[in-house]
Amino acid sequence: MDPEGILAPPQPGHISRLEFRRRLDSDADARAAFDLQVKEEQERRRKEREARVIPETDAGLVEFFLDTDAREIEIEIGRLRPRLNKGFFDHIQREIAQIKFAVTRTAANKDRLIELEAMQKVIGEGVEAYDKLQNDLVTAKERLTNILQSKDRKKTLLDMVERNELNMSILTLLDENIASAKTSNQEEAVAFMEDVRSSMLKYITV
């Protein structure tokens, strides 16, 4: 109550602004809590991944992937790529053939066949995608180096545009280098690369 009329009358929109601010603060807290939860989950999964024992045989590796969480498959493919060779896929194919041509087909064998064929497809496609990504990264590094070392940047960029070699992969790699240089306080390198970035943006194609 304000019998003396000391308090000013409430301004229009005052309550709504307070409510808006309260919701903003609440959303920020919720986002921070969610980000923390995501980081904790990532750290938990990383520790679990590092604690897993990598089998030495192809047969053991098959079981390893069958026991791997779907969310971890892509990471494990990258981690174990050298082991996912012709011998590994030949091993899977032999077991699939043994089950298919077995005299007796049990329910367990049918389930095993479904699991093996699904795994064969997922890992095969995963390896193909991983190899393409690595090849693209190598190519992007080579092209970015060419741009950074060029004495005639404009001509180099125009030549790359003509050959359809300038794309977002190179820009993304440059952005990563800029971020790394900023972290290391390499101001001259940052300024130089940001200048290169501005030049690239004039010619970039998706």
Image (spheres, rainbow, N blue to C red):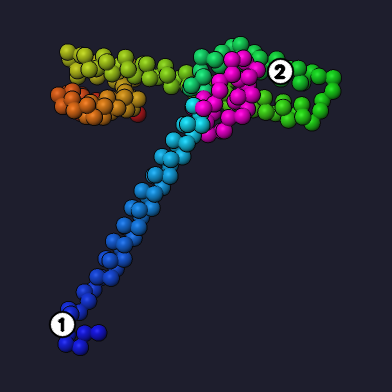
For label 2, the crowd category at 10 Å Cα-Cα, with few meaning under 14, some 14 to 19 and many 20 or more, is: some
| Residue 83 horizontal/vertical position (percent) | 54, 15
Residue 13 occupies quadrant? bottom left
Q: How many marks?
A: 2
- Any magenta on residue 65? yes
Residue range corresponding to the magenta coloring = 51-76
Q: Secondary structure at mark 1?
A: loop
Residue 111 occupies quadrant? top right
Q: Looking at the figure, which quarter contains the C terminus? A: top left
Q: Residue furthest bottom?
A: 3
Residue nearest the observer in this picture, 68 or 20: 68
On the picture, is 25 further left or further right than 75? left
Q: Which mark is residue 95?
A: 2
Taking 137 as reference, is 4 above or below it?
A: below
On the picture, is 62 further left or further right than 2? right
Q: Secondary structure at mark 2?
A: helix
Residue at the image position 51 percent from the left and 19 percent from the top: 80
On the picture, is 60 further left or further right than 100? left
> From where the camera sits, is residue 199 visible?
no
For label 1, the crowd category at 10 Å Cα-Cα, with few meaning under 14, some 14 to 19 and many 20 or more, is: few
- Any magenta on residue 148? no
Q: Looking at the figure, which quarter contains the N terminus? A: bottom left
Kind of residue sitting beneath label 2: Glu
Residue at the image position 72 percent from the left and 26 percent from the top: 113
Residue nearest the observer in this picture, 159 or 174: 174
Residue nearest the observer in this picture, 150 or 156: 150
Q: Which mark is residue 6?
A: 1
Q: Nearer the viewer, mark 2 or mark 1?
A: 1
Q: CA distance from mark 2 to mark 1?
A: 88 Å
